[in-house]
Amino acid sequence: MLIRPYAYADATPTLKVFFRAIELTARAHYSKAQRAAWADRAGRTIPTWHVARSAADTWVAEVEGRVVGFADLDASGTIDMLFVDPDFARRGIAAALLARPLSTARARGLTRVRTNASDTACPFFLAHGFRIEEQRTVVVRGVSMSHTALVLDLEPEAEAEAEAEADAE
Ligand SMILES: CC(C)(COP(=O)(O)OP(=O)(O)OC[C@H]1O[C@@H](n2cnc3c(N)ncnc32)[C@H](O)[C@@H]1OP(=O)(O)O)[C@@H](O)C(=O)NCCC(=O)NCCS
C-alpha cells in the first residue's frame, strides 16, 4: 500500500470511494435517506470535488495502482474526510492514512486534532486514541443524522519520536 499526496487525477477515484463508503460501509448505521443526503450525488461534480479536496492537505491510499482511500487535514487541524473503499475495509488502510494528518499536525505545532465522526467511523477513531467531546444530531440537506465530535491531544513531535524509539527497543 502506498500513501501519497492527493493530485487532480485522484478526483474521480476519491469521489467514487466516497460514494461507495457511504452507500455500503455506512449502511450499517444510516438509513437510505440519510446516506443519500450525506452523499449528495446530484450536488457534486469532479471540479467542485477537486477544489474542496485541494483546499485541505489530502492524502490517498493506493493498492496496486487503485485509489482505495483518502484522508485530509484542514488548516484548523480538523480531519474532515476519512474514507476507505468497502472492498478494502479492515485492512489497516484508514490507520495508515490517519498517520499522515497526525504527523502533519504535529509538524505544524498543533496540540490537538479534531473530527466529526460518523457512527461508522467513531469506533475507528476511539481505537486510535480520540476521545468523545460531544454527540450531536445534525441536519444534512434536510435530513437529521447523528455524529460525534472527537478530539485527540497530540504529543509534541520529539516526545512522539522518543516514545516510538522506546517501543522499538
Ligand atoms: C471508518 C473507515 C474509514 C475505517 O477504514 P478501515 O480501513 O476499514 O479501518 P482500519 O482497517 O484501518 O481499522 C483499524 C481499526 O479501527 C477499528 N475499526 C475500524 N472500523 C471499525 C468498525 N466498523 N467497528 C469497530 N471498529 C472499527 C478497529 O480497531 C480496527 O482494527 P481491527 O480491524 O484490527 O479490529 C471506513 O469504515 C469507512 O470508510 N467508513 C465509511 C465512511 C465514514 O464513515 N467515514 C468517516 C467520515 S467521518
Image (cartoon, rainbow, N blue to C red):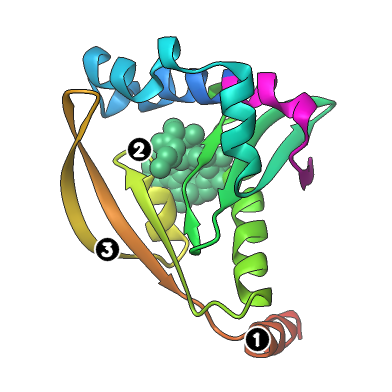
Mark 1 or mark 3, whichever is nearer to me: 3
- CA separation, marks 1 and 3? 24 Å
Pointer 1 local density, CA inside 10 Å: few below 14, some 14–19, many at least 20: few
Graded by Cα atoms within 10 Å as few (under 14), some (14 to 19) or many (20 or more), the crowding at tag 3 reads some
Residue 130 lies, with reference to residue 123, above or below; the image says below
Which residue bears the numbered disc 3?
132
In magenta stretch: residue 25: no
Image: magenta residue range: 1-15
The answer to the question of whether label 1 and label 2 lie on touching residues, with beta carbons closer than 8 A, is no
Disc 1 + disc 3, Cβ < 8 Å = no
Of helix, strand and loop, which one carries label 3? strand
Secondary structure under the numbered disc 1 in the rendered image: helix
Mark 1 or mark 3: whose residue is earlier in sequence: 3
**4 and 93: which one is in front?**
4
The residue sitting at 20% across, 60% down in the picture is: 134
Q: Position of residue 49 (x, y in %)?
A: 57, 27
* Residue for badge 2: 120
Type of amino acid under label 1: Glu
Q: Is mark 2 within 8 Å of ligand 1?
A: yes
Q: On residue 163, which mark appears?
A: 1
